[in-house]
Image (cartoon, rainbow, N blue to C red):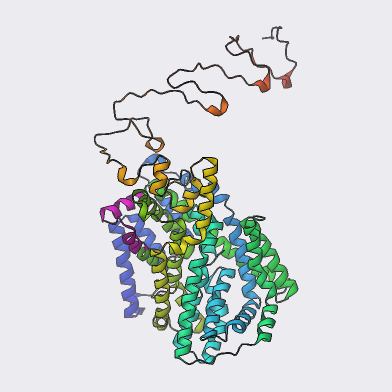
């Protein structure tokens, strides 16, 4: 197709895209421009990330790093390759596909309508709750729009709700369940940010309920304003619909019992849920055929799960180069130079960045790319100004809420394109109808961003319990610090409050003397990460390290005599201080008899 075959709008779009690629190439590098060009041409995301990582290492400034093997370390690292999340993702995806293919949406909508339909705006509230629950079970907002939205949109219109409100509700409702326990984006954030996922599941309850309640209140207001007829409450309908749904209602119960009691880990709980769902849908409800449906569902689910894991692996490989080049530290320096030193300033910039990133990038990839870039600044902010510290749970809630908002935000929100396809509407016609719902999500984002209590209240008891246990043990409450504020190094947690810093030897930020790197340089072999370094030229006595776990250490300043190590597992050791003769040549009985200690060995 030639340029003459394109419409003026198409030619303008290609011109803007070409200018953007040229600008990226000129302003950053030819590599960035090439990546942008491939992205605009529709290259798969995993290929863009993996190819970018390969090109980045092969064009490294230092020749010894120009090898593809440097892609592998973080991908094969135990934190990623041994993570239970990599097993949990395919199992949860399989559960979601089974529920979407069965008659679960019908049973869920019927039960929610029987329980909530009598309220003002009852059917709209049913849409909010049913969409949230189904997104939680399936892990995808698109599946929810197609399944739940397809059921509820005609019912909303039939009951008297306006077309704009009905379309906006089912389009937005697809992403509400992302901010609930056991959602896949929350699992991914916990994996990347080194957060305890069980604690993350507890912390997300209040923010998730906040979003659902805000949308339910708006639905009730619209129902009253538009004088929509309500369904009368009927006890028999409530009981019958809940009884019909009883087997699927046990799915979250299995998860809660398995994780809450500690009887099963997250991947084991996911396996139990997958096996249970398979039995229920294929043999109890018999909505699905063992021979006809199972191979197709399994293939589709594993294809989706494999794509997610492949994207995560390639994003992790790219992050290896990003960390090697200290790009997060460079961004931190740029933000500090721009005068962004307070939390409210940083939150404004971060929310705008995450919103744009969430519209142009798939959700899991957005988390994997953005979290390593943002964590260093949040950790540095908390270390410099304790009153500005943020917990990892608050940061996670902000991330997920931005994803929810980005999914339905014009002009590039993913939900807009899915709803356009499902309800046969132009994408541009959905921009206006989703704005009220986007405004509600934006309001919730502001509340979560500037009121830490919303995200932290559910885990305050865990923090207090960890501090009490550490107090009994006489140890620093490092596990509590991991929950209390974002840490720069998860392997070496630092105190979060001024009180803890004073007690455990860390100076308060106001007491840290300014360091003039031009006049005070550490010695060559001194690592400031493990203590203060002496000024340049100062002589330091280097003593051999003594570990009290293996015997008494000599007094400070006294040189300990170093004796040859003797292992009693291989024979009697001489008395302390006794001089031992030369060791005989080692004899291996596997290759012949060994001589007696007094006999000479044959040469």
Q: Is residue 495 depicted above or below 432 in this figure? A: above
Give left or right: position of 326 versus 137: left
Q: Residue at x 48, y 59 (%)?
A: 46
Q: Residue at x 35, y 78 (%)?
A: 6
Q: Is residue 9 depicted above or below 328 in this figure? A: below
* Residue numbers of the magenta segment: 329-350
Which quarter of the rendered picture does the N terminus lie within?
bottom left
Q: Is residue 541 depicted above or below 328 in this figure? A: above
Q: Position of residue 553 (x, y in %)?
A: 51, 23
Q: Residue at x 65, y 83 (%)?
A: 238
- Residue 58 visible in the current orientation: no
Q: How many marks?
A: 0
Which secondary structure is most common in the magenta stretch? Answer: helix
Q: Position of residue 603 (x, y in %)?
A: 66, 9
Given residues 317 and 50, the one toward you in this image is 317
**Residue 387 occupies which quadrant of the picture?**
bottom left
Given residues 72 and 534, the one toward you in this image is 534
Give left or right: position of 523 versus 359: left
Q: Is residue 317 depicted above or below 361 in this figure? A: above
């Amino acid at each position: 197709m030639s340029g003459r075959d394109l419409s003026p709008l198409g030619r303008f779009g290609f011109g803007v895209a070409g200018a953007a690629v040229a600008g990226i190439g000129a302003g950053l590098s030819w590599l960035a421009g090439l990546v942008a060009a491939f992205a605009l041409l529709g290259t798969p995301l995993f290929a863009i990330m993996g190819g970018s990582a390969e090109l980045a290492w092969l064009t490294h400034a230092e020749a010894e790093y120009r090898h593809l093997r440097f892609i592998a370390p973080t991908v094969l690292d135990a934190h990623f390759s041994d993570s239970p999340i990599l097993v949990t993702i395919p199992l949860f995806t399989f559960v979601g596909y089974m529920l979407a293919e069965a008659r679960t949406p019908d049973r869920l909508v019927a039960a929610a309508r029987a329980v909530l339909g009598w309220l003002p705006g009852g059917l709209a509230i049913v849409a909010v709750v049913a969409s949230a629950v189904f997104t939680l079970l399936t892990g995808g907002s698109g599946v929810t729009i197609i399944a739940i939205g397809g059921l509820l949109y005609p019912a909303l219109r039939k009951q008297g709700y306006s077309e704009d409100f009905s379309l906006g509700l089912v389009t937005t409702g697809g992403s509400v369940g992302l901010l609930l326990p056991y959602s896949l984006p929350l699992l991914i954030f916990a994996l990347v940010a080194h957060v305890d996922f069980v604690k993350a599941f507890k912390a997300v309850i209040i923010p998730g309920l906040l979003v659902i309640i805000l949308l339910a209140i708006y639905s009730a207001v619209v129902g009253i304003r538009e004088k929509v007829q309500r369904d009368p409450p009927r006890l028999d309908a409530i009981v019958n619909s809940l009884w019909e749904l009883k087997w699927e209602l046990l799915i979250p119960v299995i998860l809660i019992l398995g994780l809450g009691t500690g009887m099963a880990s997250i991947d084991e709980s996911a396996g139990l849920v997958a096996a249970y769902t398979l039995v229920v849908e294929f043999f109890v409800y018999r909505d699905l055929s063992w021979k006809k449906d199972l191979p197709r569902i399994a293939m589709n689910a594993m294809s989706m799960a494999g794509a997610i894991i492949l994207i995560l692996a390639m994003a992790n490989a790219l992050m290896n180069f990003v960390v090697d080049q200290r790009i997060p530290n460079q961004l931190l320096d740029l933000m500090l130079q721009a005068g962004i030193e307070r939390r409210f300033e940083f939150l404004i910039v971060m929310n705008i960045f995450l919103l744009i990133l969430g519209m142009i990038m798939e959700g899991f990839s957005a988390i994997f790319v953005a979290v390593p870039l943002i964590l260093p600044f949040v950790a540095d902010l908390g270390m410099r100004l304790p009153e500005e510290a943020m917990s990892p749970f608050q940061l996670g809630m902000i991330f997920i809420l931005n994803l929810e908002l980005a999914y339905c935000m014009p002009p590039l929100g993913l939900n807009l394109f899915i709803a356009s396809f499902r309800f046969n509407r132009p994408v541009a016609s959905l921009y206006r109808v989703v704005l009220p719902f986007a405004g509600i999500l934006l309001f919730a984002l502001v509340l979560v961003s500037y009121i830490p209590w919303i995200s932290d209240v559910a885990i305050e008891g865990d923090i207090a319990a960890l501090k009490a246990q550490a107090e009994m043990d006489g140890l620093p409450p490092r596990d509590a610090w991991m929950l209390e504020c974002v840490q720069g190094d998860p392997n070496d947690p630092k105190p979060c409050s001024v009180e803890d810093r004073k007690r455990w030897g860390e100076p308060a930020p106001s007491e840290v003397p300014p360091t003039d790197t031009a006049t005070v340089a550490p010695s060559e072999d001194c690592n400031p990460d493990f203590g203060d370094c002496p000024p340049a030229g100062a002589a330091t006595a280097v003593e051999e390290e003594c570990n009290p776990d293996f015997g008494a250490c000599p007094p400070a300043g006294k040189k300990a005599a170093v004796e040859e190590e003797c292992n009693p597992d291989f024979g009697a050791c001489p008395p302390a201080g006794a001089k031992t003769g030369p060791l005989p040549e080692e004899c291996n009985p596997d290759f012949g008899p060994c001589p007696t200690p007094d006999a000479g060995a044959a040469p």
